[in-house]
Image: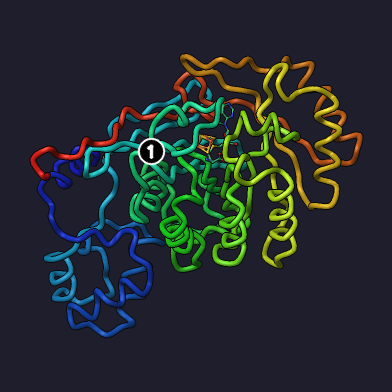
Amino acid sequence: MVEQNLADSVTDERTDLVGMDRADLQAVTEAIGEPAYRSRQIYQWIYQRGVTDFAEMHNLSKATRARLAEAYRIGRPDVSTAQLSTDGTRKWLLGFADGNEAETVFIPEAPRGTLCVSSQIGCTLTCAFCHTGTQRLVRNLEPSEIVGQIMLARDALDAWPAAAENRPLTNIVMMGMGEPLYNFENVKKALSIVIDDEGLAMSRRRVTLSTSGLVPEIRRCGHEIGCMLAISLHAVRDDVRDMLVPINRKWPIKDLMDACRDYSTLSNARRITFEYVMLKGMNDSLDDARELTRLMSDIPSKVNLIPFNPWPGSVFECSSNSQIDRFAKLLRDAGCVATVRSPRGQDIMAACGQLKSDSVRQRRSVAAG
Ligand code: SAH
Ligand code: SF4
């Protein structure tokens, strides 16, 4: 199957239908002289059933299937490497048509199964504790490459047809490589397919987008995407957050909290998750915990404490287990919901913040000048 894809991607110049939304597919059916309602059938075959061969689209005539297959294909990203952790976590390194790579991680936590999806190759931001942040942004991922990660995981997990209750894949988190809100349009389009009942059919309550804190786009996200929101807070004072999450210099904690408050008042939004990486001596004092409870006090939210995951060359140390417990206890005693994320897939470098590919921005061609 994988070899098949590798061979296809080199030779196949047909247009990929994956990543197309309902409107795009209507244009396709128009182009081949078919009525508009056919586009809905094709949409369901692609996203609900996961078919990759037009021959399986039984409710289309043979002639229609042949016309489609002439000009179009239903693709998947190529898998450069697939790894399985001793704890059951899986990681796929995906190769795209231009030679760039990004990672996708599946975390089984029965009864849930969460797919951690990348939005960019690399990241323009440089959070001090994040491996992806050491890699220059190569480019945004296309909608086809974002939904393609989920479709490939469904193939590998044998999780078709797509439906909200279909296990093992129950949750999507936009927490892989990249800052999803800096790739707003492509992420929006991809997630519209992900949460469409006739598309990948995930409940919007089970789709979470994590951002380092792009205030204007958080507001847009609330109105235009309407998924669950996670904020990479990581510090409660601006001087510390400026250093850990440099985008804080542009949108400081107060502005970020205002945007969160507004997000939570939108009818479709529920509790916001504040992610907080535990770094020894940096952000893990009980004073920090107290300030965190104050910041959260009027925002429906919960805290997810993330033990720092080291990577080659990282300069931070993870807080001790006992300090993490004390920090969590103070939050809970103050009435906050606080969970501690258990690191998963560390042996295959699949844990939060460990993702990084070898892709490098291509040099501008000298000949082109
Ligand atoms: N760019 C987005 C989403 C991807 S990162 C964001 O920053 O929110 C997903 C989460 O992992 C973020 O909260 C991020 O800050 C955190 N993270 C990054 N590096 C980490 C590390 N080394 N250990 C633990 N968590 C890390
Ligand atoms: Fe980018 Fe998120 Fe890593 Fe910061 S934590 S560098 S925003 S991927």
As drawn, is 243 to the left or to the right of 175?
Answer: right
As drawn, is 216 to the left or to the right of 320?
Answer: left
Q: Which residue occupies the extreme bottom position in the image?
A: 35
The residue lying toward the viewer, choosing from 93 and 243, is 243
Among the 4 quarters of the image, the one containing residue 243: top right
Find numbered disc 1 in the image and state the secondary structure of the residue it sits on.
Answer: loop
The residue lying toward the viewer, choosing from 245 and 226, is 245
Q: Which residue is drawn at the image coordinates 26% and 53% (left, top)? A: 75
> x and y percent of residue 42 in the render?
31, 70
Badge 1: residue crowd in 10 Å (few <14, some 14–19, many ≥20):
many
Query: Where 273 sits versus 277, above or below?
Result: below
Across the whole image, how many numbered discs are drawn on residues? 1
> x and y percent of residue 287 in the render?
85, 27
Mark 1 within 8 Å of ligand 2, using the beta carbon: no
Q: Which residue is drawn at the image coordinates 38% and 33% (left, top)? A: 136
> x and y percent of residue 105 in the render?
46, 36
Query: Where 175 sits versus 43, above or below?
Result: above
As drawn, is 6 to the left or to the right of 325?
Answer: left
Identify the image quadrant of the N terminus: top left
Residue at the spot of label 1:
137
As drawn, is 172 to the left or to the right of 97?
Answer: right
Query: Where 238 sits versus 169, above or below?
Result: above
> x and y percent of residue 255 in the render?
70, 50
- Please state which amino acid type lies under the numbered disc 1: Leu
Q: Which residue is drawn at the image coordinates 80% and 37% (left, top)? A: 292
Q: Which residue is drawn at the image coordinates 49% and 18% (left, top)? A: 311
Among the 4 quarters of the image, the one containing residue 101: top left
